[in-house]
Amino acid sequence: MIQVSQTVQTWQQLQQTLHEPKTHAEYLELEAFVRELMRQYNTDLEPYQSLWRLATGYMLRFEQANGLDKFPE
C-alpha cells in the first residue's frame, strides 16, 4: 500500500527544489538540471523519464508564459 503521508512529505521536499520557475534565474537553474539529468541518466527509461517530463513541462509552461522560444535539446 502506498503510504500517503510519507509520499506527501517526500513530494513537499522535492518541490522545494524542483518546481515551476517564477523567474528567469530559476528557469536557467531548471534548464541546467535537465541538461545534467540527461547527461547522467537515460531519460528514455523510468524513473528518469517521469522526472524529465515533469521538469521539461515546467520549462515549457514558463517559456510559453514568457514568450521564450527555447527548449533543451
Image: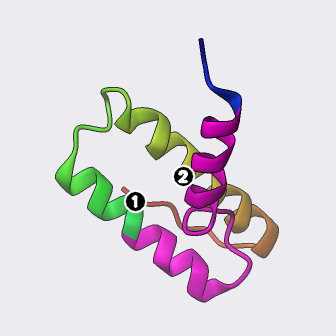
From the image, which quarter does the C terminus lie in? bottom left
Type of amino acid at the residue the image marks with label 2: Thr
Type of amino acid at the residue the image marks with label 1: Val
Q: Which residue is mark 1?
A: 34
- Picture quadrant where residue 3 is located: top right
Q: Nearer the viewer, residue 41 or 66?
A: 41
Percent coordinates x, y for residue 26 in the rendering: 59, 80
Between the residue at mark 1 and the residue at mark 2, the CA separation in whole angstroms equals: 7 Å
Q: Residue lying farthest right?
A: 65
Secondary structure under the numbered disc 2 in the rendered image? helix
Percent coordinates x, y for residue 44 in the rendering: 31, 30
User: Residue 7 magenta-drawn?
Assistant: yes
| Left or right: where 43 falls relative to 62 | left
Which secondary structure type mostly characterizes the magenta part of the structure? helix
> Which comes before the other along the chain, label 1 or label 2?
1
Percent coordinates x, y for residue 59 in the rendering: 60, 61
| Left or right: where 65 falls relative to 48 | right
Q: Residue at x 74, y 78 (%)?
A: 22
Residue bounds of the magenta highlight? 5-32
| Left or right: where 14 falls relative to 49 | right
The way the protein has been coloured in the rendering is rainbow
Q: Which residue is mark 2?
A: 56
User: Residue 49 magenta-drawn?
Assistant: no
Q: Are marks 1 and 2 in contact (CB under 8 Å)?
A: yes
- Picture quadrant where residue 67 is located: bottom right
From the image, which quarter does the N terminus lie in? top right
